[in-house]
Image (cartoon, grey):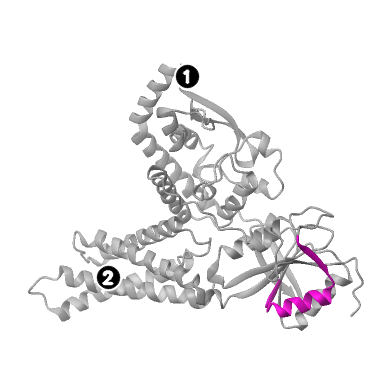
Amino acid sequence: MNRRLRYAILSADLFWIAGVFVFAERLWRTPNADAAGASTLIQPPIVAAISIWVVLYFSKKLDCFCRGWHLPSVCAQVTVGVFYLMGSLLALAFCAKYNYPRLGVPFIACLFAVGFVSIRASAFRLVTSRSAASNKRRIVILGAGRVARELARKITAHPEMSMEVVGVLFPSQTDLHGGSANLSAGSTSLRSLNVVNLLRESNVQELIIVEPVPPGRETEKLISKCRESGMRIRLVPQHYELYPKAKLSEIEDVPLLSLEEKKLPLFGQGVKRCADVMGAALLLALSAPLLALLATALYAKKGKVFRSELRYGKDAAPFRMYRLNVQRDSKHLQGYARILAQFSLTELPQLWNVLKGEMSLVGPRPESLDRVRHYSDWQRQRLTVVPGLTGLAQVRGLREEHSSEEKARFDLQYIGQWSFFLDLSLLLQTAWALFARLVNVDTFKMAPTPQSTLAGEFVTGRMMHADSTQSGAD
């Protein structure tokens, strides 16, 4: 993320914290209170709140841009962050025997949340404005296939990085979608020197290489010419997607990229399991009257209340996942069955799976044998954690009918960045998603894939290719 933007958001947050405390102090100040004395009393809470928020901001990435801009996600992250902040302030107040007004804590918390969300929304408007768009760093990707398309999509989803994908270079033997010997419509095959000249004319400032790129004199010459022209060269290593975490080191002048598998820490797994048991027990108790009513209706109509489906959980262990006996994927559901499917109430029996330890409240959704047997090594990483009732893919609008590959990119992001903070945020987003279905609000607009990536276009209206079959003589 742009460092200046990150610190600008933090500075605005800290000013807002101080302003909220000053406003709250004046609102609750008694008529006979000394203004100087009251000011002295609010200084410790301000200092404590600012210190705690700085720690939370950097440790939990509360700029809220790290996973792409998504308003429900921003609101959830800010809400959980404010919950952490107010909990810490109350704990410190208890130790210091400092008393907040009875209504002061929820009032201050609400003001914090509204202000923080507004600051981030303003930052998003700023980075997507026309003036910001004109200052973006122009990027070209050298490579083809899923990783190149994924990289282009992610750059588009992060306007705060001030980067713009203006084209894709790929070998003439492969098309943009990963096929072979099939160039996309409107594409043009160029020699490396002509490519570099066109990049210069288009004011391209950076070339990102997605391995594997085909070896050969043409490819090497293209990279060398781009570097000599002052373009920044960056590299996405081959098979990076198999490892969510990477570290860069070197031996003398030889760079080494350490690709490490990210696993949930043992302590984190224990905390997550405790939260699952308490959360599932609470939700089962709250939903028991509704489940009893639904069970009566389903038994009277179908003679069977529950159904079970074979799913694969952690380490591909099979288990039976429970549901209410409603065919969710049917397009002809009517009445209460349609409502149950629309609001995912058919999944309530899976709270029993959570209590049994077969599922978690939050995690990748479990999938059937037919899907799991066709997993790539990249997708198989979903099986390294306990599956969940909801997850990052689900709050972004992906459901069972979507492909495993679409869901895997969110699920692996969840595994690589897991924290209890993230789980709470995703539970809040799930509640918002259900509310959005109730009021028929579309909150699942995914970041569009750049047209230059899928349509075979460049700035000039052409897609360029480093042609390794032609002579590269200058």
Q: Which of the two residues, 90 or 471, is positioned nearer the viewer here?
A: 471
Q: Which residue is located at x 41 percent, y 70 percent?
A: 122
Q: Indicate whether 453 appears above or below 10.
A: above
At label 1, counting other C-alpha atoms closer than 10 Å, the crowd grade (few under 14, some 14-19, many 20 or more) is: some
The residue stretch that appears in magenta: 186-207
Q: Which of the two residues, 285 or 22, is positioned nearer the viewer here?
A: 22
Which three-letter amino acid code belongs to the residue tagged 1? Lys
Quarter of the image for the C terminus: give it: bottom right
Q: Position of residue 65 (x, y in %)?
A: 50, 65
On residue 78, which mark appears? none
Q: Secondary structure at mark 1?
A: loop
At label 2, counting other C-alpha atoms closer than 10 Å, the crowd grade (few under 14, some 14-19, many 20 or more) is: some
Q: CA distance from mark 1 to mark 2?
A: 56 Å
Q: Position of residue 386 (x, y in %)?
A: 56, 43
Q: Which residue is located at x 62 percent, y 46 percent?
A: 382
Q: Secondary structure at mark 2?
A: helix
Q: Position of residue 44 (x, y in %)?
A: 27, 74
**Residue 264, can we see it?**
no
Q: Which of the two residues, 304 or 317, is positioned nearer the viewer here?
A: 304
Q: Is residue 205 magenta?
A: yes
Between disc 1 and disc 2, whose residue precedes?
A: 2
Q: Which residue is located at x 68 percent, y 58 percent?
A: 454
Image quadrant assignment for residue 456: bottom right
Q: Position of residue 113 (x, y in %)?
A: 34, 62
Image quadrant assignment for residue 195: bottom right
Which three-letter amino acid code belongs to the residue tagged 2? Val
* Left or right, 121 with reference to 472: left
Please name the residue that numbered disc 2 is placed on.
20
Please name the residue that numbered disc 1 is placed on.
304
Quarter of the image for the N terminus: give it: bottom right
